[in-house]
Image (cartoon, grey):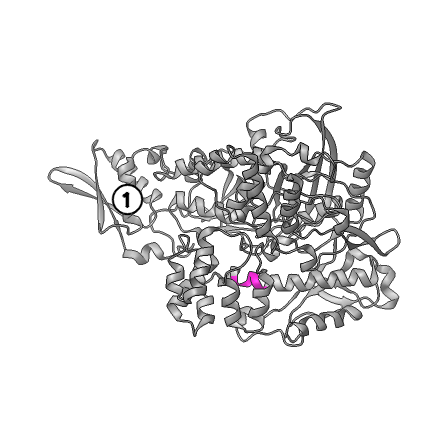
Amino acid sequence: MLGCPRGWFLRVALTSAFLRRQDQRARILVARPAPRARSQAPGSLKRFLGYLKMEMTEMTSVSLKRGSAAIEDNDSVAPAEEAKRQKVSGCCPATGQDGLENSSLPSSEKVPGPPETAGQGKENSEVPSEEEEEEDGLSEEGEEEEEAESFADMMKHGLTELDVGITKFVSSHQGFSGILKERYSDFVVHEIGRDGRISHLSDLSVPVDEEDPSEDVFTVLTAEEKQRLEELQLFKNKETSVAIEVIEDTKEKRTIIHQAIKSLFPGLETKTEDREGKKYIVAYHAAGKKALAKVRTAADPRKHSWPKSRGSYCHFVLYKENKDTMDAINLLSKYLRVKPNIFSYMGTKDKRAITVQEIAVLKITAQRLAHLNKCLMNFKLGNFSYQKNPLKLGELQGNHFTVVLRNITGTDNQVEQAMNSLKEIGFINYYGMQRFGTTAVPTYQVGRAILQNSWTEVMDLILKPRSGAEKGYLVKCREEWAKTKDPAAALRKLPVKRCVEGQLLRGLSKYGMKNIVSAFGIIPRNNRLMYIHSYQSYVWNNMVSKRIDEYGLKPVPGDLVLKGATATFIEEDDVNNYSIHDVVMPLPGFDVIYPKHKISEAYREMLTADNLDIDNMRHKIRDYSLSGAYRKIIIRPQNVSWEVVAYDDPKIPLFNTDVDNLEGKPPPVFASEGKYRALKMDFSLPPSTYATMAIREVLKMDTSIKNQTQLNTTWLR
């Protein structure tokens, strides 16, 4: 397609086609165990378990069952035999004391991306080949069951909620089951911006700007010329310049070619030359490789490319389907031929979902961004505006979620009780399972080793072979590392060098095995900090469960509350002035205080057991010093609404997306009765809270992927 790098459109199209077919097949059971379950098992779920083995980093849709254990950020729970039932406590708000909630934990994961925010998960994914996807449906039933079983065997080594301190519920209602993310379009996230408005894609038009080049810049260059220019731009050949003959020699035609090269290939300059009586536009690097590597800022723009009267940043709303934020930005940067770090955003968004968020990019025109709508599938860019400043992480006020739970088993009364409880009481503000990784080596263990200054252990935890589901090339890389301890040899096993393992191996090759600290420093800062934030989250989850177990759902003397940004203790005389929604608990660090009751000693005991000094959380390396923070223990969602609808076709969408509305599609109409019932939920959450923890409270489910996979496989039998 015109304006798109060669070969990329085909890959995107094939990927999108696969994802659409997978979405239709990914029937994720979230129903209560029933004697008929096996006979009703759809073949699509069996096939999907095969995909899970190939696409282990996208383990987001899986089965969820009431009274079981299982959901990731994308959630799920499943059945279990009565003999295997174990107790998970739940706090009953009616009495203010702990009750016990049975939860089955049958015996029977992806290195996560940057830390999660605002109820979103962030996941890397790799799509299996089209041949694998097509052949999968032809497998015989026995082969499918064998494959599912072997995948479940791999998943036996993952984490459960109990492993990361998630043990309590706050509500007293009876849980029920439903299918979460049967289609990724059943989970929609709209960002709430700095001004409190919910972001929507509502306008695809480009702001009128007389300084923009004409649309001809996207068509004036041939595919061969674009390839040569791209190779020149990226220093992929020995050419120092590329000359393009001007066939129709007019000033207007030359101007368009100049504009096309400069706008489509940042880093290149152009000039006009006469050669043997013919006019040529010559493209070249003005300042060599340093010009391309340099990050342009508002203070140091390209001299020719941006009007002074226009804001330096183009802000736009990004609508995306089934792709996380960083993957989306990497794809946009490839199409635009720019570095990803010129993009900014306020928060990362989940992968297996439809998400809408604001993005800002430095000195890229709205015209050029809008052209991507013709090239990309499952993406839409719109609501363009030029502004002076970029976006900053954490500036958002939260996210609004629209979630559909299909094939629910709860009665209307059960649904009413559950949703009223969510609206009036809320849910425990646990860090969700995706915070801790999905392999046999939890991210909090790496974080703990960093805080202990045990760098050999850090290296070993990241690179050693581990049980569990991983891509084949990572398995080979780990095996090579275990056998040779040669970072260069292990790195050669990785076709993808940008993963954490590849970055660490590159660092070890550069700095040597005796300088692990510097080698680890090659990993991007956010990814390094993810590990210690994971450890903080692990401690916080455990301490909150202890707090609720000890004191229930009421404030007590010695609890902490925030006055502005300052934490203060609740005194005996002030208890009645606060509710449980005011109480906060600290993430461990050098700049926080701890409650004045039994939980303070519990913090100390837990950190002491991990060979850490709670009174000295400063690290020799400043980046790894933990200042700490405060987090509310109970979150009450805002803008909560719900609707139970009947439907017959599990493939039909149950609400309109922003793109549907732009295309003028009428909203779905529901009959009074149908084969299935679905619960459509809407609610808003503040930043750094997890939507799956809210859904867990409604359905009374455990969220670990370990249990999801085992329970799916058990159901297939």
| Dot 1: element | helix
Comparing 627 with 76, the one in front is 76
Please tell me how crowded label 1 is: few (under 14), some (14-19), or many (20+) other residues with Cα within 10 Å.
many
Q: Quadrant of the N terminus?
A: top left
Membership of 498 in magenta stretch: no
Question: In this view of the protein, can residue 41 be seen by the observer?
Answer: yes
Task: Find disc 1 in the rendering and name its residue.
Answer: 229
Give the image location of residue 629, x and y in percent.
66, 64
Residue at image x 62%, y 64%? 535
Vertical relation: 6 (above or below) 647: below
Q: Is residue 251 left or right of residue 538?
A: left
Range of residues picked out in magenta: 528-532
Question: In this view of the protein, can residue 356 be seen by the observer?
Answer: no
Query: How many numbered discs?
Result: 1
Give the image location of residue 351, x and y in percent.
56, 45
Comparing 557 with 508, the one in front is 508
Give the image location of residue 538, x and y in percent.
66, 62
Residue at image x 77%, y 45%? 422
Residue at image x 41%, y 66%? 484
- The overriding secondary structure of the stretch rendered in magenta is helix
Residue at image x 46%, y 71%? 516
Q: Is residue 412 left or right of residue 159?
A: right
Residue 299 image-quadrant placement: bottom left
Q: Amino acid at mark 1?
A: Leu
